[in-house]
Image (cartoon, rainbow, N blue to C red):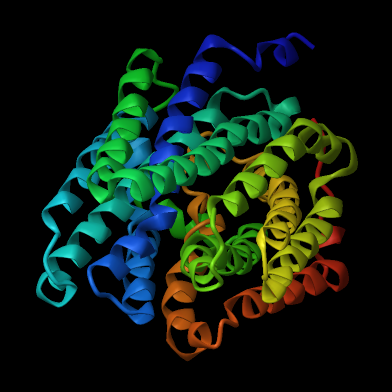
Amino acid sequence: MQGAQLLYTRTFLTMSLANFFTSSSFGSFFLFPLFVSHLGGSKLDIGILMGVFSLSSVLSRPWISSMVDRIGRKRSYTLGCAIMTILPLSYLFFHQDLSRAYPALLFVRVIHGIGLALCFTAAFTYMADIIPETRLNEGIGMFGVTGLTGMAVGPAIAEILIQQAGFVPFFLAASGMGAMGFLLHLRIPESHFEHSSLSSSSFFSVLLQTRTLKVSLLAFLFGYALAASGGFVSPYGKEKDIAFISLYYLSYSGMAVLTRFVGGRLADRLGELRIIPYAMLLTGLGLLLLCFLGGEMILVIAGLMSGCGHGFLFPCLTAVAVRDEPIRAPSQVPWTPALFPGPSFSDISESGPVSRRSSSPPVSALFLGCSSLNCFTGDAPEQRLQRP
């Protein structure tokens, strides 16, 4: 019982606050499609530039995972925060026609995606090190509250700045948020690192485990659907003449945050595998509701439904993946597939004829429905978690 009293330590709270600012910086770029349109880009350009950001996060995962073990969680997070601070400033130099700056902008998006992958992988691995085993769902869920809150605050600030002052203050604010995360985490201690190079090949050995493969598949399907909100809600809402598009992100993140206050302990009592199917289904139904977008009320309800599903789903998938793993394994578990492998494919594939028919939400909902069906009928529930 003593370990249960050590969850909300100063280190936990400091890292959570740092995560809030880096997540706010990331969330503000949900409105990056508006900048691409401002430069004369098409929906295809939006999909490519959003997708390459995500794809770089995926392809860098094996390298990042071993780096987190070799140089430490904190140092890896430091490097990620530095990228999240510097890279938003580089967008200030892109003010000409998009066709003339395309290669350079693609390069910047790749580096920016690697920086975000560093932050998320290092932060969640750090928290897995310090959270008591008996409160793993609760700890990861509550830590995720700061990220969800940041992903609501970031777009809201970005939209206000873009509408009132243009894109220059938007990029300056995104950089400032990254800088706050950088400064806040400097005083926390390192949780674990090793000087061995053995962990460089362990990413794939962990990934190929049956349990991790199943989690990764569900995470891929979830990420595919999440791409619809991350990459297409803002231009889709603008096309529908929605006045305040960030209402979706605010309601989504707000409900996900509320869910975390009860979801972690509920999953610890009932088991993650009982929660995951319903969370996937609820997220899919929320995205499906976007098909009927005609005003702000639908936007809010869709955000509330999808956010509730997300609030339960992400910590459950994470806990299933890292529970009972050795100390080195958490950094090798695919943290980022819950956010990025789906978007990297979805952002590009939905940017062509699919998005021109405004059908990315139902496509995403279909993927989530299939994954929910797999949870209900597959053999995942047979793998009951062993409680310590």
Give the answer, above or below, for where 194 lies relative to 189: below
Residue lying at the far right in this picture: please name it. Answer: 270
Decide which of 163, 149 is in the foreground and name it.
163
Q: Is residue 192 left or right of residue 229?
A: left
Residue 209, picture quadrant: bottom right
Tell me the residue at 38%/41% (across/down).
25
Q: Is residue 243 left or right of residue 274?
A: left
As displayed, is residue 5 above or below residue 202? above
Q: Tell me: residue 290, above or below residue 136.
A: below
Residue drawn 35% across and 58% down? 32
Q: Whole-percent x and y of residue 335?
A: 52, 49
* Quarter occupied by the C terminus: top right
The residue at 36%/63% (across/down) is: 34
Res. 9 image quadrant:
top right
**Percent of width and height locating residue 141:** 67, 35
- Looking at the rendered image, the quarter that the N terminus falls into is top right
